[in-house]
Image (cartoon, coloured by chain):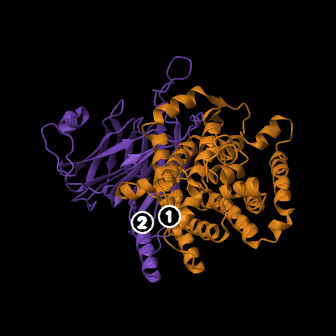
Amino acid sequence: MDKHSLVLWAGFGIGLLFGLTGQRSGFCLLSALRDYWQTRDGRKLRAFVLAMAVALLGTQLLVALDLVTLRNSLYLQRSFSWLLVPLGGLLFGYGMVLANACGARALVLLGTGNLRSLLVLLCLGISAYVCLRGVLAPVRIWLADASMLTLAVRDPSLHGLLVALGVTPRLAPGLATVLVAVPLLWFALSSAALRSSTRDWLGGLLIGALIPAGWYVTGNLGADPFTPARVVSLSFIAPVGDALQYLMLATGMRADFGILVIAGVPVGACLGAILGGSWYWQGFESPAQMRRAITGGVLMGLGGALALGCSIGQGLTGFSTLALASFVAVIGIVLGAWLGLRGPLRVPR
Amino acid sequence: MRALRIVCAAALLTGLLGCGNGDAPVDAAAPVPDWRNIAPIRALLGDITPSQQGIELGLPLVSEDGSAVPLTVSVHSAMTIEDYVQRIYLFATGNPTPEIAAFVLTPALGRAELSTRVRLNESQWVYALAQMQDDSWRLAAQEVQVTVSGCLSRPEAMGTSFTQPRVGLPRSYGQGAVIAVRTLVDHPMETGLRPDGQGSLLSQHIVETMQVRLDDELALQARFYRAISMNPYLQFHLRATTAQLSVHWQDDQGAQVQTSVALMPDA
């Protein structure tokens, strides 16, 4: 099997595992934040944090073992927009609350028969493309150029920052990883509630592990000296748009890892739902709910495009690279979610 | 019901995986803009009308990255002394200068199929022109939509070195089998159109020629122009025979890079 096909099959497999695990465990950042802020139930949030720690440790291990290089990834670009990345995060977080799911969760729900998430995904994919390559692209580029921040550090990640502060380059990656992973692991695993909820910690662990798996597939299995391709892992903004475009233009377009992950998630979720007997059609209960779903999907697509990722794309994948821009994006996403759940622009349930 | 759902999902999946190899099929209904309007093609053809059969140009329908668009040109020919492709020309009609590359082929290639990565300035029609051994001509054209890149990043400073030649062969092949050979060499392929940030343009610096030899016989020659992407990549075919395959690149400043590898077909 040639490298490209191997990457595609592996991507589908990773998507399938994500869908299956997501459906069985209920892994979801929105639910995590909502449960924590509204009922002080921290299990899902701790599961998400566990996933962040596992993704981080797995990814940095791959880099330390020289199995993958992340230098060319989207998250470690030296320049990013100080305006659009946090703004995008805010829009995404708020949109996530309106739509009642992020892009990844919507794909999982789609697999269980939820037609509301189909609309959310269509709006998300189309608006992401509108922002990235469509009618809003010139505005995005103009704003990005006007607010471009080029970091003085050679390596725009936490390790690079530590090196700039005087830490020896050989120790910096390990130190940065430990500085971040240890508090995350403590927060997650110190809770008896999480430890006793197998569904949650296992879900977090498995999903966290899929991030380094994705890096390995695109950065190692698929590495081809003759055809350099950007190293990527799980992301649910641009790939949703790519998948829609692929459905329409397959005769003149190549599929890639991201598209196959998108294809795999609903299949895995469907399998999980059928096995668990929880597959049934769901639709909208009111026009207001439908409006919120549309608006939420559009905001997530726009926001995710500006922030270079979503709850998984930046929250797990970008975060696993310890890119400074990813920290900004994640803070934006959580703030946006707060605005929708607790803040002045609270969305009525 | 459950089984039906599973079958539908499997069917959709097979459909998704089965399609999409990336190259648009020749669409007989789409009218090709008149090649007579393109000066370099008119200069080559004169009064001759080329055939539009027996040649295919593969490009993605939509490309996000105009700096490295994969292109494959394939001419149907047995590649024997009686019937082979002499030359292939590639033109990008929407670029500042239309020439992409020109190739001189020989029957030793076994198949007239070349793949590379090209720079396309904007959405445009790309043309491929092939001259056969009997001086007949074939023409193919493909339209490519080039969008802006989705990434916010500015391009990193390009490397300036002309190094790291690479040749890729299949792991095993039989004597006489037609095998795909992939070649790549690092080179900035500076177009001469990029501003240097201080008001003037960075001067052009590109790989101009590439020669492929089997023992000492010239099998393929390529002339590259600035529309070939950074780190020029070329895939071609060869009839496998026990010989030394050597590839030689030269740039417009006279620098040369060369590599060679032994072809060792299984008996």
Chain letter for the residue marked with disc 1 in the picture: A
> Chain B appears what colour?
purple
Q: Is residue A139 above or below residue A109?
A: above
**Visible residue check, residue A6:** no
The residue singled out by tag 1 in the image is A263
Are the residues under marks 1 and 2 on the same chain? no
> Amino acid type of disc 2?
Leu
* Horizontal arrangement in the rendering, residue A285 relative to residue B132 (left or right): right
For mark 2, name the chain.
B
Amino acid under disc 1: Ala
Q: Is residue B221 visible?
A: yes
Dots 1 and 2: beta carbons under 8 Å?
A: yes
Q: Nearer the viewer, residue A38 or B152?
A: A38
Q: Is residue B102 above or below residue B74?
A: above
Residue A26 point in image, percent of width and height: 66, 66
Expressed as whole percent of the image width and height from the top left, the position of residue A103 reads 56, 55
Q: Provide the secondary structure element on which disc 1 rests.
A: helix
Left or right of B245, for residue A210: right
Secondary structure of residue under mark 2: helix
- Of residues A24 and A179, the one drawn nearer to the viewer in this rendering: A24
**Relative to B35, B171 lies left or right:** right
Seen from the viewer's position, the closer of residues B99 and A187 is A187
Quadrant location of the N terminus of chain B in the rendered image? bottom left
- What is the x, y in percent for residue A127? 47, 45
Q: Which residue is mark 2?
A: B16
- Tally of marks: 2
Question: Which residue: 26% across, 61% down?
Answer: B80
Colour displayed for chain A in the image of the structure: orange
